[in-house]
Each structure stands twice: as C-alpha cells, then as structure tokens.
Image (cartoon, rainbow, N blue to C red):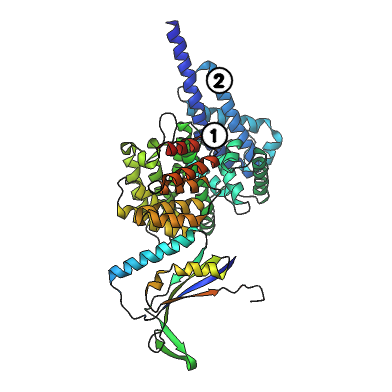
C-alpha cells in the first residue's frame, strides 16, 4: 500500500514535470500578451516578470499541494492577482499608467484583467504585429516574438540563431528600447501597414514552426507544442478578415502537410526516421485534408509566394508512392522556388528531385556544380546519388558528411547510411 | 561578380511547335534555369511571347511583330551572375534554345551604373 502511494506520488511529480513546461509554453505568452496589452509596450518587462512570477509560484505551490483541478484557471487567477497587487504596490508605476488606463481613484480592484479567449487571441495578434514593427531589425523581431509570444528561453533563442545568450540579451534589450522610443501601440495596424508587416509576421511563424519541427530537443511534447502554436497563430490570421490572405493560407497549408508526418518522423528513442522509411499509416490524413483546404484558399490570389511553392512541394510529399508525376512536379516547384529565393537546402533538395525525375547521371553532374563543400547535406546528397553507381565514392562522401556533422542525430543518420551501403 | 544577359535568338519565330514539343521544351528550359538558380547564379529572366508584338521604326511606322524582313527574333532572355564571360558562356551552352539549328544565345554583360559603363 505504501509503495503504491509513493508510486502515485512519483507519478504525480512526473505529471507535473511534464505539465509545467507544457503550460509554460502555452500560457506564459498568453498572460504576457494580455498584461502587456493592458499596460502598454513601455512596461513589457513588468508583464514578463509578472508572468514568470506566476509560474514560479505554480512550481512551488503545486509541488507540495498537488495539482489544482484546473491548472490553467489557477494560473490566470494568480496572474490577475499579481497584476492587481503590482498596480496597488508600485505607486510610481501606477501613476505612470493611470492616465493610460483611465482609472478612477477608487483603486484597482475593479480593473478588468481580461483573460478570456477572445482577448487573449486579440492581444497576441496585436502583440505580434507590434513586435514586427519596421523600426527594429528582423532578427530582433523574431527573437522578441519567440521570447514574448512563444515563451522561449534566452538560450533557446540563442540556439535558434546560432549565437550566444549575451548577444540575444543585448539584441532583445535594444529592440525593447526601440519599441518604447517609437511608442509602438499594441493594436492592429492599418490595412496598408498590415500588408507591410505581414511578411515578417509570416517569417516569424515559419521559423517558429521549423524550430519545433527540426529541433534537436528530444522532448517530443515541447516540439509538438511549438509546431501547433505556430499553426494556431497562423490559423488566427486566417480568421481575421484583413490578414486572411493567400500567402497566409499557403503557409498554413505548408505547416499542415509537414505536421501530418510528425508522429512518423522519430522512433521511440528520438532517432530520425528518413522519409522513405516512415510508416505511412502514422501519417495524419486529417491534417493532410486540412492542408488541402487551406491550399485551395491560397490559390485565390494572383501572387505566388515562396510559401505557395513550399506548400506545393510538401503536398507532393504527402503521397508516398513514387511516381514520375510526383517527382516531376516537385522538381518544377523547386526550380521556381530557387528563382524566387535561393537557399542551399532548396538547391540540394532540387538536385535530389532531379535524380528522381531525370535520372542519376544528370543529377550527379548538377550536384557537383553546387560546390557546397562546407555543408554536410551536400556530401550526404552526393553519397546518396553515388550509392547505385559507385559504392566507394558513395562511402567517401558519406564519411565526409560524417566529419561535418555536429549533432548526434545527424551522425546517427549518416552512420546508418554508411552501414547500409 | 558580373551580371550577363543571355539573349535567345530564334531563326524562325513563326515556326509552330506541337503542344508536346512545347511542353518538352518548357521542361528543359525550366530545368536549365533551375540548375543555374541552384548555384545561386540566377538573377531574373523572362520569355517574350510573339503575340502582341510590334515594331516601331524610323518615322514612327508601326508594323506587326518582329517578323518579315528581320530574320532572327528574340524569344526571351535570362540574366545570370558569373565570374567571367566564359562562365556565362558555359551557362548559355546548356540552353535548350540551341537545339534548334540556326538559333543562338547572345551573351552580353550588363552595364554597371558606376559612371564608367
């Protein structure tokens, strides 16, 4: 009986250990967005601090009292009280924002801290557009969005940008300063301004999704959260009349097509399973269908964005059977994508599609022209192409790729390729 | 790195190709351009369809299309980045336009607005 009890307790602690990071991912940014919207961009740090304190208290309280019945409601309740206390306690802060809030002298008990679903949604979208203000550089915009709207830690942002914590801290600090100087309002910009900022907003969401999808983290729950968060915010944009534009739908379609393979991409131990080895029955057909719907919406305009092309490529990947038609379509989409925007990974993928559509010989000639000798995927591609032609050369290329691999996952995948030769 | 225009000249612009030929030619052109873009050497380009084409001559005389007394017509152009004219010529050699006898690709350097050119 006793051991059953301690087991139950251990289970509870485990649940909490998973639940708190999960809630942090989903709720931290909601609380921050609502409070920041309420206080104004000047007090962005106050909003962040109050949200952090709320989670600190949750960790402390829940570990000895156990989980509350409704953890999210608990967090909102505590956040509201902390916000009210802060307003009552900090007189300087209060007098500063009183005018903004148009509060009566009756005190702050009556402030409505609105954590309803609608206000959370509105606040987040408005924050997103505020953070993507043209006065701050794109990298800082994305960094801020990751921090404030997605609850990323500074070290996670540093990882995402391949830089160090100090640089990220400085960058975010300067960006917040700039937002204050520019007196950026947390509101929906006007139509013309929305169009200008939308590209950065979409890029931020695209990077957020990628971070979840390709992350090195072995924590599947966290990675999935990130992907679905990005999808959720993108979905919000499609529900807003002003932002329901073809490229937004294209991005959402792209995310759906990729996310449909989420459960098939890694095995139990977190090792990547390559596309051709994936268990098709694990592909989520519901997400594929959703993607198709958004893709239809995306085809309404007359402008072709890179998201349209990438969604097209992702769509063809949802069909497992190799056909001439499939690879021909993928090749042509990559041909156009590269004309619109070059990237080494698109160049490499295009060459792989070329091998499927036009044959190995042509693809090897084209691959060797790419000359991306610092890129491990370049050598992995050459290894793959030479596999059926010259095993020695294939091995040499895979070994070169191995020597360039920096992560455990990459090394695992390449080692397997060498073993299977 | 300089930019070069690769200008496609067709000997007989009035020749009508079958839809299958057109499709095959389109694919080859897209694959050729995709190959240049995959090396990050593609700048821009466009086809120049023969419909709705006019020639404005001396004394502002307007004629239909570039055909008739002009033997060659321009079918389009692509602008590429290249280290040298030789590299641009290597790109040009891959153009499917050259499969037609009498067709040619003219390689021309793009003038820089540096006050010299």
Farthest-out residue, top: A1
How many numbered marks appear? 2
Which element type, helix, strand or loop, lies under badge 1?
Answer: helix
Which residue is labeled 1 in the image?
A: A28
Q: Is A414 left or right of A102, judged from the image as shown? A: left
Give the chain letter at badge 2. Answer: A
Residue under pointer 2: A61
Q: Return the residue nearer the eye: A57 or A158.
A: A158
Residue at the bottom extreme of this rendering = B59
x and y, in percent, of residue A335 in the image? 43, 59
Chain identifier of the residue bearing label 1 in the image: A
Is residue A119 something one can see in this rendering?
A: no
In the rendered image, residue A56, in percent from the top left (x then y), is placed at: 59, 26
Q: Residue B43: x percent and y percent?
A: 52, 65
Mark 1 and mark 2 lie on one chain; the one further toward the N terminus is 1
| Residue density around tag 2, few if under 14, some if 14–19, many if 20 or more, within 10 Å | few
Q: Quadrant of residue A279?
A: top left
Q: Is residue A114 above or below residue B64?
A: above
Asked if the residue at tag 2 contacts the one at tag 1, i.e. Cβ–Cβ closer than 8 Å, the answer is no
Q: Please state which of residues A279 and A405 is positioned toward the viewer in this rendering.
A: A405
Quadrant (top left/top right/bottom left/bottom right) for the C terminus of chain B: bottom right
Q: Secondary structure at mark 2?
A: helix
Q: Are the residues under badges 1 and 2 in a single subunit? A: yes
- In three-dimensional space, the C-alpha distance between marks 1 and 2, rounded to whole angstroms, equals 17 Å
Residue at x-position 68% and y-position 50%? A181
Does the rendering let one see residue A10?
yes
- Image coordinates for residue B66, horizontal then vertical, percent: 41, 84
Using the image, determine if residue A29 lies above or below residue A310. above
Q: Residues within 10 Å of mark 1 (few under 14, many from 20)?
A: many
Q: Quadrant of the N terminus of chain B?
A: bottom right
Residue at horizontal 61 percent and vertical 37 percent from the top: A154
Q: Residue at x 39, y 84 (%)?
A: B65
């Amino acid at each position: 009986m006793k051991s059953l009890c301690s087991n139950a307790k251990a289970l509870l602690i485990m649940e909490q250990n998973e639940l708190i990071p999960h809630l942090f991912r989903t709720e931290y940014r909601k609380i921050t967005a609502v409070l920041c919207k309420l206080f104004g961009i000047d007090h962005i740090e106050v909003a962040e601090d109050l949200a952090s304190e709320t989670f600190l208290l949750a960790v402390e309280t829940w570990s000895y009292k156990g989980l509350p019945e409704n953890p999210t409601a608990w967090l909102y309740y505590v956040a509201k009280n902390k916000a009210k206390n802060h307003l009552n306690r900090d007189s300087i802060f209060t007098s500063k924002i009183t005018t903004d809030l148009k509060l009566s002298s009756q005190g702050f008990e009556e402030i409505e801290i609105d954590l309803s679903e609608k206000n959370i949604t509105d606040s987040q979208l408005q924050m997103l557009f505020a953070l993507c203000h043209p006065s701050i550089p794109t990298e800082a915009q994305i960094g801020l969005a990751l921090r404030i709207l997605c609850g990323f830690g500074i070290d996670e942002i540093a990882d995402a940008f391949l830089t160090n914590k100090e640089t990220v801290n400085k960058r975010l600090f300067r960006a917040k300063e700039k937002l204050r100087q520019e007196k950026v309002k947390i509101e929906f910009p006007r139509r013309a301004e929305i169009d200008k900022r939308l590209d950065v907003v979409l890029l931020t969401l695209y990077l957020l999704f990628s971070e979840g999808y390709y992350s090195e983290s072995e924590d599947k729950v966290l990675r999935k959260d990130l992907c679905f968060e990005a999808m959720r915010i993108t979905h919000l944009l499609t529900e807003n009349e002003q932002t329901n534009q073809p490229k937004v739908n294209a991005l959402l379609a792209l995310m759906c097509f990729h996310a449909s393979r989420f459960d098939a991409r890694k095995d139990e131990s977190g090792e990547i399973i390559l596309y051709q080895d994936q268990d098709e029955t694990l592909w989520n057909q519901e997400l594929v269908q959703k993607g198709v719907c958004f893709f239809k919406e995306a085809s309404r305009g007359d402008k072709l964005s890179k998201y349209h092309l990438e969604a097209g490529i992702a769509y063809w990947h949802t069909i497992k059977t190799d056909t001439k038609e499939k690879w021909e379509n993928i090749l042509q989409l990559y041909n156009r994508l590269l004309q619109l925007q070059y990237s080494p990974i698109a160049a490499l993928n295009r060459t792989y599609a070329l091998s499927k559509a036009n044959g190995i010989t042509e693809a090897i000639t084209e691959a060797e022209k790419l000359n991306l000798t610092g890129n491990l995927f370049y050598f992995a591609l050459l290894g793959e192409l030479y596999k059926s032609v010259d095993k020695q050369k294939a091995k040499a290329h895979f070994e070169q790729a191995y020597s360039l691999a920096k992560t455990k996952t990459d090394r695992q995948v390449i080692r397997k390729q060498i073993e299977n030769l | 790195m300089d930019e070069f225009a690769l200008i496609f000249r067709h000997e007989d612009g009035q020749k009508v190709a079958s839809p299958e030929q057109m499709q095959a030619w389109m694919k080859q052109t897209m694959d050729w351009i995709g190959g240049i873009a995959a090396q990050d050497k593609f700048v821009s380009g466009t086809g120049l369809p023969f419909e709705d084409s006019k020639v404005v001559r001396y004394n502002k005389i307007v004629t239909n299309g570039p055909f008739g007394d002009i033997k060659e017509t321009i079918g389009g152009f692509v602008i590429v980045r290249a280290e040298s004219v030789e590299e641009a010529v290597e790109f040009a050699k891959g153009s499917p336009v050259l499969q037609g006898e009498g067709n040619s690709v003219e390689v021309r350097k793009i003038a820089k607005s540096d006050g010299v050119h």
